[in-house]
Amino acid sequence: MSVDSYQRAAQHYSLNQYADALAVLSPLLDRPDADAEALNLAAACAYAMNRADLAQAYWQRAVAGHPGHAGVHNNLGNLYEQLKRLPDAEALYRRALDLNADFAEAHYNLGNVLALQERIVDAEQSLRRALELRPDLASAYYSLGKLLMTQTRADEAQTHFRSAIEARTHWADAHSGLGAAFAALQREDEAERAYRAAIELNPRLTSAYQGLAAILDAHGRFAELESVYRRLAEHLPESSAAHYNLGQVIYRITALVGLERIDEAEAAYRRAIEIQPDYTQAYIALGNLLKEHPGRVDEMLATFRRAVEIDPNSAEARINLAAGLLRVGAYAEAWPLMEYRYGDDSSGRRIRVPDLPFPQWRGEPLEGMSMLVIHEQGFGDSFQFCRYLPLLKAQGLSTLSVAWLHNDTLLASVEGVDACISDDALHTSPRHDYWCFMMSLPALLETRTIPDVTPYLAADEARIEYWRGRLPARVPKVGIAAMAEPRPSPFEARRWVGAQACVPLLGLPGVRFVNLQKAPVARAQLDTLPPHLRPLDLMDDVEDFADTAAIIASLDLVIAVDTSVAHLAGALGKPVWMLLPSNPCWRWLIDGEDCVWYPKARLFRQTQPNQWGDVIARVADALAEWRDRN
């Protein structure tokens, strides 16, 4: 081999002049006995030029012509690893090690390819052997750290990430890996510092942004979270995910303060879609944002439909379309789509199907059969949808059982229910012919309208008598459930009012308010009120919803936000006034004071996002009129 030609080619390679390097090497490569180093350099040039086919040809020639050269076996193995030909790569690495057992880089590469094949024990052994031979091999420390993280061995992993950083101080990926290890160990301050260091070293490293964002999100540090995603979008303007996440955090921030910046969130979602027209999650997010605008219902539905068109297998897309349709009362189309809410997936957002020794009902004939109906999601959902149980029993069931709360038999009062089974006895309950989720009944019964059957729940007469004796007589009694409860989502938090906002209402003379909330956070807010404004609170003695139902039955009116108490009052046929945010749940449609679910309900809607003042004023005026009539 001409040493001068090879050196000139190597010089071109070092300057990223790969075509020039190949031109210089060409005479050397034309020889039948081409030197291994010339072939190796030519392959490296071809690979750098994205000519994997040519690189493979050169390395294969090198292996064939120089079978005792460990380095070319190792390099061809690297190419095969990049091409996902993992068994071929493994074979070449092992051949390289047969030729040179102390070849640290080959041990390292073998460890990586074994890890990709999930052969964890062997991968760890190979990586540790590489480090024995080359204690300064930063990449091996990093790979071993990543491998240990997959085995939930974060404490060991962090020591190896530290070693990688010691060997290569400015390696952003190693700092990000260290952040992940600290996060797994719940050492969040150290994790945050590591992630921020990684971002400073590589402002385009998405893994570091994601790790830092998770910490900020968990602690509600939304302003900092916005800054993180905005910086990512600036450094990766072509990243649809960066713009999507920026839209998500802006929307969350603005949901807490009145939606002043909702247009910014919308613009970010639309930019994400512009970059990636098939971005299902961005369409779903945009559709949910459009719910904030009652006048853009058609656009909201079209957006959800587009998400379903893009990914017909997306349960989340179908569920969101269903919720959008329910908001406009399109029940016939919506109910079947709601059936995508359950199933097993990695997101954790879907309802898990119970493992029972009898089949889920899919609409088969029920004459003479037995059925177990299982409550799901919130308690309010069960109070709302148990109205369908009599229709189910009318299908000819011999036995209708309901899985409900432990020691709470309230749903046994529904017509047609033969037995209530406590949740904790679900898997030891008597065998039935079928089981079904409560909220699947509208779809499976093919109902196109809301059954007008209220009241369909009844409180126990003995309990009513007991609680009536503990309530004041000869004064209108109004139950209230509006005090804020902890909610992880700012969107959920918007539906709660809070004690101080209720002062104009609670100060109305001639009415005795009764607390209907048992949650300690909600009840604690009562203590912040002046004594003469505090509702009567009997909840220390309330054991279950059957007691709450008996109290409600003893009242004249209930005022509540969208919570289980409101649904319980409606199901009992009690007049209930509901305080609704500007973007309410699909159950309450998009406008109007009447309620299709509860004929005695009256809906008081926000006219401005997050502003309860005018709602409370309207309720107080209406309550004064109601008091005077009663």
Image: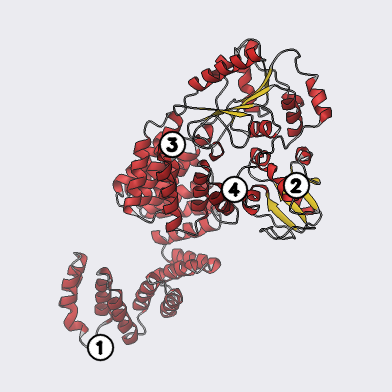
In front of the other: 24 or 578 = 578
- Residue 142, x across and y down, in percent: 43, 58
| Secondary element type, mark 2 | strand
Which three-letter amino acid code belongs to the residue tagged 4?
A: Arg
**Residue farthest to the bottom, as pictured:** 32
Q: Name the residue under label 2.
A: 402
| Secondary element type, mark 1 | loop
Q: Name the residue under label 1.
A: 33
Residue 340 appearing in the image: yes
The answer to whether the residues at label 3 and label 4 have Cβ atoms under 8 Å apart is: no
| Secondary element type, mark 4 | loop
Q: Which-is-in-front pick, marks 3 and 2?
A: 3
Which three-letter amino acid code belongs to the residue tagged 1?
A: Asp
Q: Which-is-in-front pick, marks 3 and 1?
A: 3
Looking at the figure, which quarter contains the C terminus? Answer: top right
In front of the other: 592 or 403 = 592
Relative to 563, say whether 88 is above or below.
below
Earlier-in-chain disc, 4 versus 1: 1
Q: Name the residue under label 3.
A: 294
Relative to 444, say whether 299 is above or below.
above
Residue 162 appearing in the image: no
- Give residue 448's mark: 4
- Residue 291, x across and y down, in percent: 45, 39
Earlier-in-chain disc, 3 versus 4: 3
Q: Which-is-in-front pick, marks 2 and 1?
A: 2
Q: Which-is-in-front pick, marks 4 and 2?
A: 4
- Residue 201, x across and y down, in percent: 32, 48
- Give residue 321's mark: none
Earlier-in-chain disc, 3 versus 1: 1
Q: How crowded is mark 1: few (under 14 residues within 10 Å), some or many (20 or more)?
A: few
